[in-house]
Image (cartoon, helix red, strand yellow):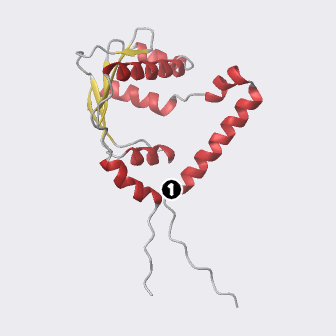
Amino acid sequence: MGTMATQSPFSLLEGFFQSFQLPVTPPQWIVEESHRRIVLVLNHVLMQEPQAMERLARQKGRVVLVQWQQWTFKITMTPAGLLDMADGHAAADLTLVVTDTSPLTIAQAVMQGEKPNVRIEGDVQLAAEVNWLIDHVRWDIEEDLSRVMGDAPAHGLVQAARGLAQALQQFVRPTPASTPPEPQA
């Protein structure tokens, strides 16, 4: 009797995600509105970190282009230390190209507390500032939720989300080969 090879659900989905292409590109207004929403969320998080805003203010007028496959997102730093949508024709001072092609691979890296694979081109000092922001700025989502729904429900929701994230991390983290138990004498 032969043994059946088992595959991780992630490896089964990997082929699907790699072949997944949107048949139609979304309308430009949807793309622009989603970019505006991302900038709003990023600015909300930045406003909670004065040191991050100081660092960005020093980079005012600089443009960062983030690219993944055919999707691009171009932002500029404002004198106030926040972000804004960059003019579509503005030259990028820094380009960050996410080289992982599968959204699943990117999600796995993020769930394991790692950064996705990125090719960096452009200004070294700006790249160092962006890297500092990525390493040090965190969204206190529990604080924001508590303003809307109260402390106890916000705490419960965040704890549930953390539990789910930990379960997913354990699922996607490769486990070392298990050793059989020692025979009992």
**Left or right for 28, reference 109:** left
In the rendered view, would you say 11 is above or below 133? below
In the rendered view, would you say 28 is above or below 112? above
- Number of labels in the image equals 1
Which residue is at the far top? 79
User: Of the residues shown, which amino acid type is indicated by label 1?
Assistant: Arg
**Left or right for 165, reference 85:** right
Residue name at image x 42 percent, y 84 percent: 2
The residue indicated by pointer 1 is 173
Residue name at image x 64 percent, y 87 percent: 183
Which residue is at the far front? 23
Mark 1 residue crowding within 10 angstroms, few (<14) / some (14–19) / many (20+): few
**Left or right for 136, reference 105:** right
Instruction: Give percent across and percent down for residue 125.
Output: 33, 25
For the C terminus, give its image quadrant.
bottom right
Residue name at image x 68 percent, y 35 percent: 157
Instruction: Give percent across and percent down for residue 109.
Output: 44, 46
**Left or right for 141, reference 119:** right
Which residue is at the far bottom? 185
In the rendered view, would you say 110 is above or below 129? below
Hey, which quadrant is residue 114 in on the image?
A: top left
Instruction: Give percent across and percent down for residue 20.
Output: 33, 45
Residue name at image x 28 percent, y 26 percent: 94
* Residue closest to the eye, 146 or 6: 6
For the N terminus, give its image quadrant.
bottom left
Secondary element under disc 1, as helix, strand or loop, is: loop
